[in-house]
Amino acid sequence: MPSSALTVTQLNRYIKSLLEGDRKLHDVLIRGEIHSFHRHFKTGHLFFSLKDGGSSLKVVMFRSAAAQLQFDPQDGMQVIVRGDIAVFERDGAYQLYAREIIPDGVGAQQMALEQLKQRLAAEGLFDAAHKKPLPAFPRHIALITSKSGAALQDILQVIGRRYDLCQLSLLPVTVQGEGAVPTIVRAIEYLSQRPDFDLAILARGGGSQQDLWLFNDERIARAIYNCPVPIISAIGHEIDFTVADLVADMRAPTPSAAAELAVPDLGDIRLRLEQLGRRAQAAIQGKLQLCVQQTDALRRRCQTQHPQKDIDRYRRQLDLQKERLALAVARLTEKKKLQLQAAAGKLESLNPAGVLARGWAIASKDGKTITDAATLQPGDKLLLRFARGGADCTVQQTWKGED
């Protein structure tokens, strides 16, 4: 075996020294499309390939550098990668060790914002169904803003002019700089623990897009979403629109507009009450006037159709009916009296006692009255009854009577 033969390790190490010693391959910018993107779940390192129309290059980005990214790399994304070319000695493959990934054609910050919006929208944080209604007459409003900013003064002025019946509490926060996001999140979480608040305004005055960028932070968005108290966002000017605005229950173009949305105008309420009072008074007056007219009509009707006249008429009719009834009763009584006398006379004529008094007698045999002599035989015993007393007799002879 030739003594000049190299081992694989020696060759890879030599190539590694050549590539890593070439200053042209340090801090290079490579443009391409991301393919086969993978984030190692344990280490947090990123592994992917950069491709163009004819070639492919493996790329590694260690966790420390990946943590600085402002967006999530995805397959198919056009990017520019900054890093160093080096050899992975074990596999004998050269690759790009990335320090920075820049979206090609769009800022990393803007891309990160669009990705965040898509993710939060998919979770439902922007859905109208989750928006809480604002109270019509708030009693206690939290103002989450800078204590030295113009936004606070604008809100106080508007609410003081429109609706001085509610309590205002300032939850001071920092609205710019690196420490702003944690202070805003803490204020919203504090608000969530206070049942006496029924409304909140999250406000910041105007500024550059970069000044307002912190309100695109995911932590603020989730704090707003989880807060049980309705929140009005008023960040920047009318043209400014942040993630916090999308999650808030109501978005106002300016802090002054937020104050107008938060409270009603007592002047308008008083005017409305006055209008309702006048309408109610007119309605009552109209009703009273109608009642008076109806009462007058009834009075006139009673005067022309007094009930006493009907009563007198009915009384006269009753008296006449009573007279007619009395006359009818008298006539009926007389008729019945005559009928009774006739019946009494007839009965009197049929009275056996009267017949006996005229000399007749009643003959009976064995308790039965005898009306036909043909029923008797000589020797029959008879009882004769007279008007006064009676006599026992024996039949000696019978003869046929004439009809």
Image (cartoon, rainbow, N blue to C red):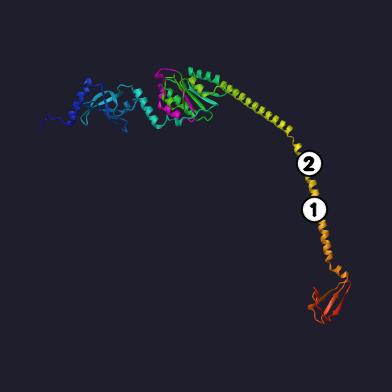
The numbered mark at residue 332 is 1
Name the element at disc 2: helix
Q: How many marks?
A: 2
Out of 98 and 282, give the one closest to the viewer.
282
State whether the magenta stretch is mostly helix, strand or loop: helix
Whether residue 94 sits left or right of residue 179 in the image: it is left
Classify mark 1: residues with Cα within 10 Å, few (<14), some (14-19) or many (20+). few
Name the element at disc 1: helix
Classify mark 2: residues with Cα within 10 Å, few (<14), some (14-19) or many (20+). few
Q: Quadrant of residue 211?
A: top left
Q: Is residue 397 on the magenta stretch?
A: no
Q: Position of residue 325 (x, y in %)?
A: 79, 48
Q: Position of residue 291 (x, y in %)?
A: 67, 29
**What residue is disc 2 on?**
316
Tell me which segment is drawn in magenta.
206-233
Q: Earlier in the sequence, mark 2 or mark 1?
A: 2
Q: Position of residue 186 (x, y in %)?
A: 46, 27
The numbered mark at residue 247 is none
Which amino acid type is marked by label 1?
Leu
Residue at (77% x, 44% y) in the render: 318
Q: Is residue 207 on the magenta stretch?
A: yes
Q: Quadrant of residue 281?
A: top right
Q: Quadrant of residue 241?
A: top left
Q: Residue furthest right?
A: 388
Mark nearest the camera among 2 and 1 is 1
Out of 75 and 190, give the one closest to the viewer.
75
Residue at (80% x, 51% y) in the render: 329
